[in-house]
Amino acid sequence: MHVIIDLCVVPLGVGVSVSAEIAACQREIQASGLEYRMHAYGTNIEGPWDEVMAVVKRCHEVVHEMGAPRITTTLKLGTRTDRDQRMDDKVASVETLLGEQ
């Protein structure tokens, strides 16, 4: 099953800046070979369900290995069975409507 997720990993107990931990998570996402797009408050990732969930797990493992005693994660996800839809398709649909105005 194809899934598109919005992932926001927040390490707790590592100080005010979490850039190093987020960069480590992004390296795991990039290494997965999945399509992704980082944004200011998280990352969109798409691909086969098991592969996407495996990279979410790996992000937690890596951030814990860096010393974060706690992690809170917000995960939104969507699946479709009626048609194939990718992240870019969803964005393009809205951009087309904006261009018509």
Image (spheres, helix red, strand yellow):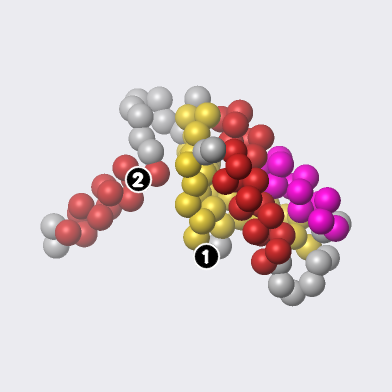
Q: Which residue is mark 2?
A: 88
Q: Quadrant of residue 12?
A: bottom right
User: CA–CA distance between discs 2 and 1?
Assistant: 18 Å
Residue 51 at x, y = what percent? 60, 31
Q: Quadrant of residue 66?
A: bottom right
Magenta residues (range): 56-67
Mark carried by residue 40: 1
Seen in the picture, residue 23 relative to 3 is either above or below; the reply is: below
45 is within the stretch colored magenta: no
Seen in the picture, residue 64 relative to 79 is either above or below; the reply is: below
Looking at the image, which residue sits at the far left?
Answer: 100
Residue at 63%, 36% (x, y): give it.
53
Q: Secondary structure at mark 2?
A: helix
> Disc 1 marks which amino acid?
Ala
Task: Check contact, mark 2 vs mark 1: CB within 8 A.
Answer: no
Q: Main secondary structure of the magenta part?
A: helix
